[in-house]
Amino acid sequence: MKKITGIHALSMGLAMSLAASAAIPAPAATDKLTVVVTDEPKSLDPCDTDLSGNSRILHNNITEALVNLSPKDGSVVPSLATSWRQVDNLTWEFKLREGVTFHDGKAFDTNAVIAALKRAQDPALGCEVGVATLKGLKLNAEAVNPTTLLIKTDVVEPILPNKMSALDIGSPATPGDTKTRTPAGTGPYKLVAWTPGQSVGLVAYEGYWGDKPAIPNATIIWRAESAVRAAMVDTGEAQIAYEIAPQDGTTGQDHAFPNAETSLLRIDAQIAPLNDKRVREALNLAIDRDGLIGTIFHKDAQKAMQVVPPSVFGFNPDIPVWTYDPEKAKSLLAAAKADGVPVDKEIVIYGRIGIYPNSSESLEAIQAMLADAGFNARLEMLETSPWLKRLLKPWSKDRQPSILQTQIDNAEGDAVFTLPNRFTTDGNQSTITDAGLDKLIADGSKATGDERKKLFQQAFKYIAVDTVNIAPLFHMVTIARVAKNVNYTPDVQAGNEIKLKSISYR
Amino acid sequence: MSFTYFLKRAAFAALALAALMTSAFFLVRLTGDPVNLYLPVDASDAAREAMRIRLGLDRSLPAQFFDWAWDILSLDFGMSLWHNRPAMDVVLEALPNTLALGAIALALAFTAAIVMGSIAAVNAGGWIDRGVNVLSQAAASVPDFWLGLMGVLLFAVTFRILPTSGFGGPIYWVLPVACLFARPFGTLVQIVRGSMIEALNATFVRTARAKGARDGRVTFVHALRNALLPAVTVTGDLAAQFAGGGGVVEVVFGFPGIGKLLIDGILKRDFAIVQASIFAVAVVIFVINILVDMLYASIDPRVRVE
C-alpha cells in the first residue's frame, strides 16, 4: 500500500476543506428569507398567540385577527374586519372583510370567527388567548349574516376591539377538542412544514386578500446562543436575527428597537423593612440608572418612571424619573432606623436568569449600589420556574423582605393589560392591598376616552410616587441584526410579530 | 458471554432502571410546578387550577406515581407538554442524532488517542512526548461552549468554510464533532501514553524483543494490545456519558439531540420528556456496558465475562 506522506495529507486536507466550502449554503437567493429566533414555538395553534414565541410565527403571517394595533400609536386598525362599532354598553358589531379564504380553501365568514372565539374560551383547551387576554370576559358571538358579527359581553368592555387583536382566526376545520400543529389561516403565508427541533417553513399564499409578500419563501429557525444568531447573519445563513445581546450587537447591521417592555424591581412592601416608605424611597435613590445605561443596559434604553412605556394609553408623563442620590438614601435609612425600622435586615434580590440580556450583571451592579447606600442585600438568581413561584401568589407570610427583578410587556397599548394583575388586592402578582387603588383601576378599566386616561394616569402616579411600590429601571430595547441587502425596520411590535410581508430584498 | 450472564445483567439493569425512573419521577417534581411556566403570568388562579386538574397534578403524589408507573410498564411515557406529542416519539427522533454524533466523536478520539499516545510513549521524555502532553492536557481541559463559539467565529465567520450551526449534511457535523472530540481525546491520550509506557517496559515486551520481533510489531501488537484495556474501559465510560448527549454543544449548535432535549425538558418542566429521555439514555448505557464487556473479553482472552 502506498504510504501517505505529509504533502499528501496536506493536499487531502485542502481538498476536504474546499469540498466543505462548496457545501456551505450560499447567501440566500432573494426569493428566500431565513429568520433566527431564540426558541422553538410551543405550539402553532391560532389560539396560543399570547405567547410571543408562537405569535412571531403565526400572527399576520399564517393567521390574522379581526383587527390590528398600529405600531405608531396603538390605535385599532382594520385587518379581517373592515369596521366596528359599539352598539350598546354590552354589544359590539364587526363588519367582516369579503372574499377572504383560508389556506385550506374554506371561506372566511362570521361562523369562522364564532368557532375561533368558542375555541379560545374553551377551558378544556387551555388556550393562551383565553386564559390571558380574554380572561374573565364572557363573549357571546352571533352572526347577523356572513359578514356582520355581533359580540356581546357580560360586563362593559370599552376596549373589546383591542382585545380582539389578540385572537387569531384559524380555519373552521381546526379541531375543536385539541391543539393543532398544522394551522390554516387567512394570512399571506401558509405553513409548509414544522420540523421539530429544526425549523418552520412558510410559503406565500397565492389566494391572499391583501398585498402579496415580496419574498415567497420564509424559514424560521432557532438558536439559543446570541453570538451564534448574530454570526448566522454574517455568514448569510440567516437574514434577520432577533435578541442579540448588547455585547454582540455592536455593528451597523444591529438595530435596537423599543420592545414595549419595561424592566423594574417589584418591592414587597408588606414585609419590614420594606413596609416603610422611606426605605423604598432610599432604594430608588440608591440606584444609579445613568451608570447602568450604555454599559449593562443598551444605550438606547430609556430611563423609566412607571411600569409602561409612553406608547401605552394611560402613561403619565408627569411622574419624575428618580435621581441618583446615595447620600439622601443613607439619611432616609438612618431616619427609618431611628424610628425602629429594622433597616439592617437582609433583603433578598430575586433575579431571573436570562429575563433580558445581562440580567445577572444588572442585579450584581444594583446589589453593589444598594450596599453602598447601606442596604443589606443578597442576590439570588433563579431560573424561570422558581422565579415564577416568587412572582405569583400565594406567598408565605413568613417570607423574607425581597425585591424582585421583572419586566412588564405591554404591546397591547392600554394600561388595563398591565395594572389589574400587578397592582390590585386580588392581582396574582400584586404586593399592594389598597382599596383606593383597586377602585381607581376598576373605574379606569370601565371608562372610555379622557376619563379612562386620567384614571390610569392617577393609578400610575399612585404606584410610583405615593406608595413607591416599584423601582422602575428602563423602557427596554431589543436588538435585531439585519442583513445589509434586506429592507426591514423592526418596530415596537417586533417582539411579538415578525412582519414577513413587510420584508424585502434591496 | 453466556446467555445466563446476559439475563443476569438484564435483570440487574431492570432493577437499576426501576430505581432510576422512580428517582426521576420524584426529583423532577421537586423542581417545581410546570403550570406557572405554561400559562401566561396574567392567567387566573382558576385557569391554573384547571390546568393542574387536566394534567393530574392536583392528585396526591403516590396516586400520580402509581398511574405513571403502570403506564411506563406499557412504555407509555405520556404527552410532552411543550411538544404536545407523545414524549417517547420526540425522544426517539432526537436519540439517533446524539448517538451518531457521540459515536463519530468518540471513534475519532479513540483512534487519534491510540496513535498519539503510542507515539508519545515510544518517545517518552522527548520533545514529541512533551508536545503531545501539552496538546492532550489542553484538549482535556478546554470548555465545550468556549470551543464551540471559537469554532463558529473562526471557521464559520472568518474562514467561511463551515456553517455556524444547524442540522443537515456532513458539513453540519464538523464543528459539533470537533467540540465533542476534544475532551475524550485529551483524556485517552494520557491513558494510552501511561499504559503504553508501562507495557513497553514489561517483561513480555522484553521477551518479544529478545526473540527478534521488530519495533513496530512490538509496539502496536504486543504492547498496545495490553495497553488498550484501560483505554477501552474509559472509552466505555465516555460513551455512556455521550449517550446523554453533549448538552452544551447541542445547544450552541442547535443540534437536535437528546442532550438539548433533556436540558430544554428540565428548564420547561416537561416531565414526560425528562422521564422518557432518562429512560432511553439508561437503556442505551446498559447496551454500551454490555458491548464494552464483550470488547474487553475479545481484547484480553484472560478476561472471562461470567
Image: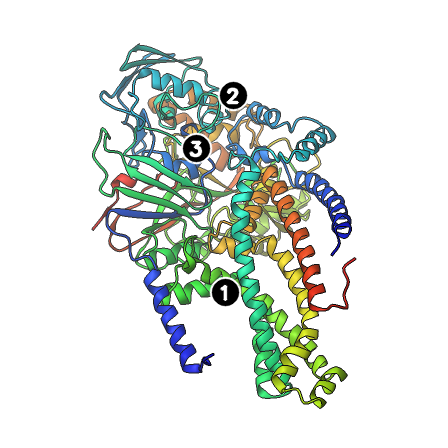
Identify the secondary structure beneath mark 2. loop
Residue shown at 38% from the left, 69% from the top: A17
Please determine if labels 2 and 3 lie on a single subunit: yes
User: Chain ID for label 3?
Assistant: A
Label located before the other in sequence (2 or 3)? 2
Q: Is residue A132 toward the left or the right of residue A497 in the image?
A: right
Amino acid on which the number 1 mark rests in the picture: Ala
Which image quadrant: the N terminus of chain B? bottom right
Residue A181 is labelled as 3
**Which residue is labeled 1 in the image?**
B178
- Mark-to-mark CA distance, 3 and 1: 35 Å
Q: Is residue A144 above or below residue B300?
A: above
**Which residue is labeled 2 in the image?**
A123
Q: Residues within 10 Å of mark 3 (few under 14, many from 20)?
A: some
Of circles 2 and 3, the one toward us is: 3
User: Chain ID for label 2?
Assistant: A
x and y, in percent, of residue B30 in the image: 68, 40
Identify the secondary structure beneath mark 3. loop
Of circles 1 and 2, the one toward us is: 1
Please determine if labels 3 and 1 lie on a single subunit: no
Q: Nearer the viewer, residue A134 or B105?
A: B105
Residue A272 image-quadrant placement = top right
x and y, in percent, of residue A443 in the image: 45, 20
Residue B193 image-quadrant placement = bottom right
Query: Can I make out residue A244 in this image?
Result: yes
Amino acid on which the number 2 mark rests in the picture: Pro
Q: Nearer the viewer, residue A67 or B219?
A: B219
